[in-house]
Image: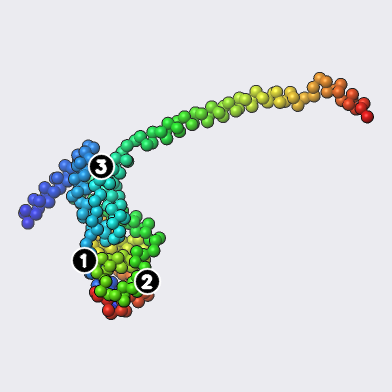
Amino acid sequence: MEPLEFIDRLAEKARGAPPVKTDVRAGVLARLRRHKRPWPLAPMWIVAGWMVPAAAAALVAMVLSWGALKPLLAKKARPGPFDEVIAPFGEMLP
Amino acid sequence: MEQTTAQAAVGIERDWADIRASLGGDEDAFGRLIDRYEALIAAQMSRLCRDRMVCEELVQDVFVKAYFSLSGYRGEAPFVHWLRRIASNVAYDYCERSSRRPPSLPLEEWDQLKKEPERLDADRAMEMLQGLLAQLGTEDRLVLTMLHLEECSAEEVAERTGWNAGAVRMRASRAREKLREIVARTGLSEDWTWNL
């Protein structure tokens, strides 16, 4: 049999196949209800709404604390009042 | 003739009433639209796939998409034409997704069928043809499914897909040539014992 004739005869036979029976009403309506309901999104927005200001506040706190710490650290780096006394004393040790 | 026209007019009016009620949030009205057109859409989808679960999922997709686009329905064409167009889009997406999967009926099973040609009933023939069509590209598969299995005219295919009728004819002719090559390569048509 020629391939095209084979395809046409196969299609003719296939057209006799009964359609698949479905029952989708309940499934479709359930999916629509899920889509329409806004609440699954709400908790996500509440968390996101708190996370953004919290992250910003943490950033500000870090900057401020760094500003307060910086002079202290800088002072510590300078030689202390006893450093000059101790150093020669240390040099005198055997 | 007059009676048929009158029935069609009543059908259109009934669809409109349910569409308006659905847009107003009436769930039962949309349920009535589903009841009215489910069998039609299921028949269209079962030309693409014989698996009941997959078929149900595709029909559900059509109605869910229809629901969310309902406000865009202008009533220029009957509701069923509009719904069939959505179904064609869903079918296109399905062909695109399933083209990466192997055909539903593997070649070994075809060889088995060759030995027992009496097993080739309409369901098997459909699976076999779907398996062959699945080896084509998405557009080719869709066009040949509509032309050969749904018995649509080129104009109907054009209306459902939004393509030009001339382009549909051209694509169908090329797709048939590709399908001929596939059948010739597999040697399926050489066995004259096929119960066709």
- Answer few, some or many: residues within 10 Å of disc 1's Cα (few below 14, many 20 plus, some between 14 and 19): some
> From the viewer's perspective, is residue A81 above or below residue A94?
above
The reply to whether discs 3 and 1 touch (Cβ–Cβ < 8 Å) is no
Q: Nearer the viewer, mark 3 or mark 2?
A: 2
Instruction: Tell me which numbered mark, 3 or 2, is placed earlier along the sequence.
Output: 3
Report x, y in % for residue A22. 24, 53
Q: Which residue is mark 1?
A: A16
Q: Separation of disc 3 and disc 2 at Cα?
A: 49 Å
Regarding mark 3 in the picture, which secondary structure is present there?
helix
Q: Badge 2 sits on which subunit? A: B
Q: On the rendered structure, is B54 left or right of A73?
A: left
Label 3: few (<14), some (14–19) or many (≥20) C-alpha neighbours in 10 Å: few
Question: Label 1, label 2: how many angstroms apart (C-alpha)?
Answer: 24 Å
Is residue A11 something that shows in the picture? no
Subunit of label 3: B
Task: Specify the amino acid type for callout 3.
Answer: Ser
Return the residue nearer the eye: B6 or B185.
B185
**Residue at the disc numbered 3:** B71
Determine whether the residue tagged by mark 2 lies in a helix, strand or loop.
Answer: helix
Q: What's the residue type where badge 1 is placed?
A: Gly
Seen as rendered, the residue at the extreme top is: A81
Residues at marks 1 and 2 touching, judged by CB atoms closer than 8 Å:
no
Q: Residue B164: horizontal and vertical position, in percent? A: 28, 59
Inspect this view and state whether residue B117 appears. yes
Q: Are marks 3 and 2 on the same chain?
A: yes
Quarter in which the N terminus of chain A is drawn: bottom left
How many callouts does the rendering have? 3
- Please tell me the numbered disc located at residue B108: 2
